Image: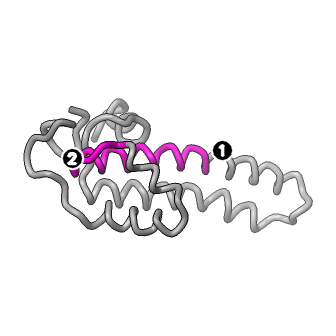
Amino acid sequence: MPDKDEFIWLFFRFNGRLGRAAFVLTAMFWVVVVSFPLYQFMRVPPDSTAAQAWSAVFGMTFIVFLWVHVASAVKRLHDMGKPGIMAVALFIPVISIVAFIALCLFPGDAGRNRYGQFTNSAR
């Protein structure tokens, strides 16, 4: 079982390299996490205090999701030997879909590059 530092690196840090499988699984995991409060919000009456609470929880989880998604994209770009600033493409409509698919499909650099020695490692 990975330790706490590895989970913090995977979800919140911008350094290192991340492979395709880890990138896709991270994205799928956080989509499920963000979907839960949205589902709960849709189950309660719109004008209730529960709706307000679930709306706030959804907002917070969505902000965390954005951070994790950008951090994962930066690490994925590092694995491909590209600078992390290219993750800005994830915020441009239509291009973001193409960029996400490209990050999922294109392989990373084999072996060492300037962002780390191994895929799925901080350095």
Q: Which residue sits at x=42%, y=57%?
A: 27
Span highlighted in magenta in the image: 62-84
| Residue closest to the eye, 89 or 10 | 89
Is 73 within the magenta? yes
Q: Position of residue 21 (x, y in %)?
A: 27, 59
Residue named by callout 2: 81
- Say if 55 sits above or below 12 in the image: below
**Which of the marked residues, 1 or 2, is nearer the chain's N terminus?**
1
Q: Main secondary structure of the magenta part?
A: helix
Q: How many marks?
A: 2
* Quadrant occupied by the C terminus: top left
Q: Position of residue 62 (x, y in %)?
A: 61, 51
Q: Which residue sits at x=81%, y=64%?
A: 44
Q: Which mark is residue 114?
A: none
**Mark 2, secondary structure of its residue:** loop
Contact flag, marks 1 and 2 (Cβ < 8 Å): no
Residue named by callout 1: 60
Q: Position of residue 117 (x, y in %)?
A: 13, 37
Is 78 within the magenta? yes
